Structures are given as structure tokens and as C-alpha cells.
Amino acid sequence: MKKKSITASEFDTKFDEGEDISGHLDLSQAARLHQGQKRVNVDFPIWMVQQLDQEAKKLGVTRQSIIKVWIADKLKEVM
């Protein structure tokens, strides 16, 4: 299905009015800035891993997820 072309003004109006504008977007090459991944290795004491696992289990998330969220929260706090 071919997308109908609209002007920037029409696009802005549709967006501002809460209309679904997704049909007017080409997301085939969309990317989030600064969202690349880099693997790092961190050694934690066993007691810390156990507490991380307990908290992750309570929240229903993975250990990796809770570590990422907590570090992101702290970085936002200090910046």
C-alpha cells in the first residue's frame, strides 16, 4: 500500500490533534540516538548478586534489567 503524501503542516496538525500518523512515516531506517549497546563485565560480591536476584524476582524482571534501571536512575540523578 502506497503512503499518501501530505505536507509538513498537515502532518503537524494531525499529530497535534492526536491522529494516528504512523501511516505517514517510513520507519525502515529509524534509529534511536545514543542507544547502541556495549557489553561490559562487572564483578559483584556474592551477597550483592543475591540481593539483586531477590529484588529482581520481586519485581518480575531480570537481574540485568534491574541493574540497568538502577544505574540509569543514578546517572539521571547526578547529571
Image (spheres, rainbow, N blue to C red):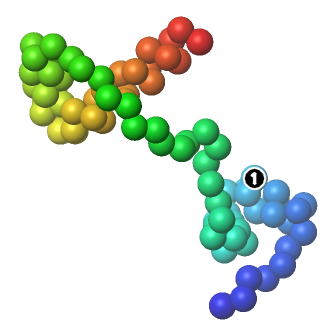
Label 1: how many residues lie within 10 Å, few (<14), some (14-19) or many (20+)?
few
Work out whether 79 lies above or below 24: above
- Asked whether, in this view, residue 73 is left or right of residue 51, the answer is right
**Residue at 64 percent of width and 43 percent of height:** 33
Query: Disc 1 residue type?
Result: Asp
Q: Determine which quarter of the picture holds residue 60.
A: top left
User: Residue 25 in the image: x percent, y percent?
Assistant: 70, 68
Q: Secondary structure at mark 1?
A: helix
Camera-nearest residue between 76 and 16: 76
Percent x, y for residue 54?
Answer: 10, 25
Farthest bottom residue? Answer: 1
Percent x, y of residue 43: 24, 20
Q: Which residue is mark 1?
A: 16
Q: Is residue 45 left or right of residue 2?
A: left
* Residue drawn at point x = 61 percent, y = 39 percent: 34
Residue name at image x 51 percent, y 12 percent: 77
Asked whether the viewer can see residue 34, the reply is: yes
* Residue under the image location 66 percent in, 65 percent down: 29
Residue 51 visible to an observer of this rendering:
no
37 to the left or right of 15: left
